[in-house]
Amino acid sequence: MIQKEKIQRGRIDDEFVRLSITGKIDDILLQKTPVNLTNIFSEIGNRRNFVLIEGAPGSGKSTLALHICQEWAEGKLFQEFDIAILVKLRDPLVREAITISDLLPCTNKAMANETETAIMSLYGKGVLWVLDGWDELPSDLPRDSIINKLIRPDMSRESPLHESAVIVTSRPSSSAKLHPRVSSRVEVLGFTPHELEQYFTECLNGDSQAVQTLLERIRENPVVESSCYLPLNASIVVNCFLSDNHSLPTSNHGIFTSVVQSSLKRYLQDRLGKTTPVGDITSPDSLPSEIRTETVQMCQLAYHGIENNKATFTDNDLAALRITKEISNVGLLQTVPSIISDGHLVYYCFLHLSIQELLAAIHISLMSPKQQISVFQMLFGNPRFSAVFQFYAGITKLRTSRPILSLLPRFLCPVPATVFDLVRKVVKNTTIFLLSLINCLYEAEDSRLCVFVANLLNHNLNLDSTTMNPIDCLSVGYFVSACSNTSNGFTLSLSNCSIDDQGCKFLARGLSKCPNSNNDIPTAGMHIAEIIENTISISKLDLSNNAIGNSGLCELCAALSTNTSLKSLDLLRCSLTISDDNGAALYQLLNTNNSLEYLDLSHNTVTSCRHIAAGLAVNKTLRTLRLRSCELTDQSIEELSTGLINKIETLQIFCNDSITEDGMKTLARHLTTHCSELTRLWIPYRLESCIETVFMDTNEERKRNGLPEINVCYDVRYVY
């Protein structure tokens, strides 16, 4: 059950809520509590019984909708209702439904009209409507559609169905308009890690060794790991594992290409009795003649759906495109009998939206370059533009298919000018489109285009306050690594991007994916420190307000310890706990990095400064250290003082309420003879009197010792 209290990703104390936050666009960042299905209508009060069931595509919403109706029919659930009516909103007949009778699967019109009269006479009392797939409902629904009456929020007698109860399913990214109307919201979460292992065990017939191998493959694969919680995706992954000799693709393009190829292979073997190799689905000429026409027609239909924002198709759609119904025999396009027509009418939909997007991308890739750009210009801003363009990038590597240009060396014509123009348009648009483009660059694996985009961005990638899922982190890491060949410094700002420990790991994985001009970078899975050693020309890295955690800090510090270009590292509010037991990573960073000048660890918990001090004692480049609001104590200050013998110019330790005047005296005694370049010191506001009682004498001593005066401040207004 979704509550109204908002939460911030990475600041979640409740384990149940944490498990429901996966880093995807369909995340619901609100407080949640477990709820039994029998109680979803409880605690509604006087509001109309209107429940919204949300979940990412493939999480099991449609399965749950069907389950609710079956449980009602068997007398096990919601027996307060006299009738339950399941309406598949993707059904083309729904678009034409004006009256209740138009939605009823009755054998004759007279029975439908009689049922409608009975329902209307009671204002819908005793009726449970289960409307499955709000996100698949056509946007051009007629104003007089019966669906509009079912979801009306008012409870007056003017609403003919105000006594009926309604359950609607939808993906969260499409349900915002329903939120003011519903009485409660419920989320379908998909598989927990334990349930996922149990599911794989069943799929692999209890072969524990195969299950562990599959789980290891998934953990090595960021693309798969971030989406396996969805049951539909999990079923695709286990099928890929079985059909690809216990290996898994590393990109979305690879995963769904494997699905399509497996389906075509089964069709050839089971339906046609052929053992012919499937060939390359992106090149129709390489396909066996028995499936060539069907594949081309499926790609055409998929593109037609993307162009017109359709997920379902009728016989009329197929006829208009001169496509035969036989394409549904291949297994990628399923034939669905309409419940409303009692099975007399069928419609078609692809097994997965991503399969439709992949096939549409193949169709586009076969067009001329001029047509391709024209299509993307037309689709720019379309809800599914990003997904199609990512598949297109994986298919074409964003290179031209024109024969003459394809013969030219890549350094003369790495990509067609028209693609450059398209990329320019994306870069100049919103941050969301920019992040989608970076995902495409990961799919394309073209470092030259990454450099081109970096130049357009003036070597400054600012994604502040952009919610990033693990795949986004993977792609950004790859993009930054691909730009490492340039001599210009690169600034990466990821403040408040909701990056958690998993996202940090995937960011590191992405850094390993791109080859460097001088070195062969190891494959993903090797220690991150070996991956980016002397390979990334990044000068500023801002990861503030992301729940990186201690394990994420270890990976980053190891990676950056031998980096020669990073000058600024911002880890403000990153859920770190730096103690005697786990502070060694910071020591490694400060001890071995020879370029870092700015380090912000503010608003993290620092219970011991021993490792920080040890690192400062040997570091020769750090100029600014921020430790505000770190729960420092007098003991922390004493430990920190032992390391202040380097070139630190600015030190911030304010907003640490446990520091007393004794702590300031300890620091002052040390500064009389050490830290020759320290000129700015911010201390806790409560200790402002120490400026005169303690640090005035310290500055006199420093002056006699030939050291510069320290400007001691307590007012936070001077910090920024």
Image (cartoon, grey):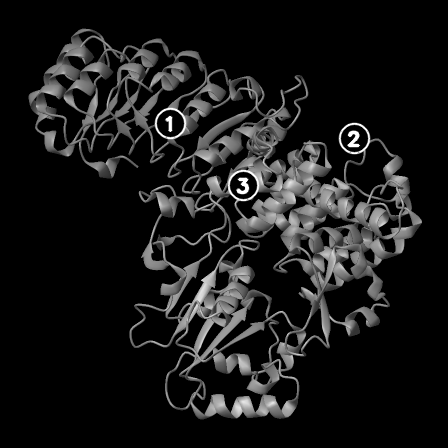
Q: Quadrant of the N terminus?
A: bottom left
In this view, 105 is above or below 377: below
What kind of residue is marked 3? Ser
Comes first in the chain, label 3 or label 2: 3
Residue located beneath label 2 in the image: 411
Q: Are marks 2 and 1 in contact (CB under 8 Å)?
A: no
Q: Nearer the viewer, residue 462 or 555?
A: 555
Q: Position of residue 612 (x, y in %)?
A: 31, 17
Q: Position of residue 688 (x, y in %)?
A: 11, 30
Q: Is residue 440 visible?
A: no
Residue occupying the point 76% across, 57% down:
374
Q: Nearer the viewer, residue 381 or 58?
A: 58
Q: Position of residue 244 (x, y in %)?
A: 72, 35
Residue occupying the point 67% across, 17% down:
518
Secondary structure at badge 3 equals loop
Q: Are marks 3 and 1 in contact (CB under 8 Å)?
A: no
What kind of residue is marked 1? Asn
> Within 10 Å of the Cα at label 3, are there few (<14), some (14-19), or many (20+) other Cα atoms?
many
Residue 672 located left or right of residue 98: left
Marks 3/2: CA–CA distance: 35 Å
Q: Which one is closest to the eye, mark 3 or mark 2?
A: 3
Q: Which one is closest to the eye, mark 3 or mark 1?
A: 3
What kind of residue is marked 2? Phe
Residue occupying the point 85% across, 45% down:
283
Residue located beneath label 3 in the image: 226
Marks 3/1: CA–CA distance: 20 Å
Q: Is residue 352 visible?
A: yes
Residue located beneath label 1 in the image: 550
